[in-house]
Image (cartoon, helix red, strand yellow):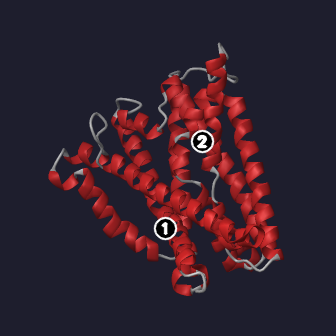
Amino acid sequence: MENRRMIWRTMFNVSTSIIGAGIMSVPATMKVLRVIPAFLLIVLVAILVDISVDFMLRFTYAGQSTTYAGLMKEKFGKIGSVAVQICVMISTLGCLIIYLIIIGDVLSGQGEHVGVLQEWFGIHWWNSRNLAILSIVLFVILPLVLYRRSSAIAVILAIIFVGICSVMAIVAIIKGETIRPKMFPELKDSTSFFNLFTAIPVIATAFTFHFNVHPIGIELGKPATMTSAVKISLAFCAAIYFSIGIFGYLLFGDSIMPDILVNFDKSSGTSAINSILNDIVRLSYTLHLMLVFPLLNFSLRANIDELLFPKQPYLALTPNDSCVLR
């Protein structure tokens, strides 16, 4: 019973690490690849990620390292360790900045794409973009960094995001407002062929969570439990990605934007119910990003700390700092 509870808790942590900003671009890849190739790509990337994480865990438990950088140091020396730390810091910092930009866009947009607060209350100084982001950072994200149990909530919000999209798509199908999705892409020339490859980095990035494998695994201390949790998480996230891709594609067809939230802020219908659902979709995704923020923030802090203070204990080994992963 305890082992099963640990697996599910770890699954929530891993799933939260995986599902981030990349989920917004998955429907656009469906437009490029069409349904069957997109499904195959999602499955293929999930399998490759599972294999790569399995390699990481095997070498980690076989050696003395407890961190991603430590593992690279064992195999490639100091240069490999520093290189992976720099890459992780750049990628996590970039993701955190992107999260804040998305949150700002949803709450207080710019130009023709107004935010939720501006739609509800009009344009005022107190719901400006900069003030909205500052308020979220101080009063929401900062406390969440210290909160112990946010992963399950983040996953639930992601499910709500997908669930509402699916309901809207099903209603549109019943009303006959959707077009029949194309199963395969139409390759008219070399340009359209090479456009297919633009979907690969989107899906690959959407499954990236390797820098959080060690912090999450440290708390378990059981290789079999971590391996099982990773497999469950990857299967769950693959299902989430394909669901949002197909339902987003059904809702908006070829007019779907690279950022699906842009389609929702235009409203997929004129009724009050559609407007409410659009707002719920955008707000649930924004809350999801706020809850994912602490995990990426921890990875950034841990790698900076390990780079600057290599002889000090790893942050995930100290109770006060590992709490964001629980």
Q: Amino acid at mark 2?
A: Val
Q: Which image quadrant for residue 54?
A: bottom right
* Residue that extends furthest to the top in the rendered view of this protein: 188
Q: Amino acid at mark 1?
A: Asn
Where is residue 190 shown, x and y percent of the image? 66, 17
Q: Residue at point 29% right, 62% down?
A: 134
Where is residue 79 shown, x and y percent of the image? 66, 67
Q: Residues within 10 Å of mark 2 (few under 14, many from 20)?
A: some
Residue at which label 2 appears: 202
Q: Which mark is residue 297?
A: 1
- Indicate whether 54 appears above or below 263: below
The quarter of the rendered structure image containing the C terminus is bottom right
Q: Residue at point 31% right, 37% down?
A: 113
Where is residue 304 shown, x and y percent of the image? 52, 72
Mark 2 to mark 1 CA distance (whole Å)? 22 Å
Q: Which image quadrant for residue 135?
A: bottom left
Q: Which mark is residue 177?
A: none
Q: Residue at point 27% right, 56% down?
A: 132
Between discs 2 and 1, the one toward the N terminus:
2
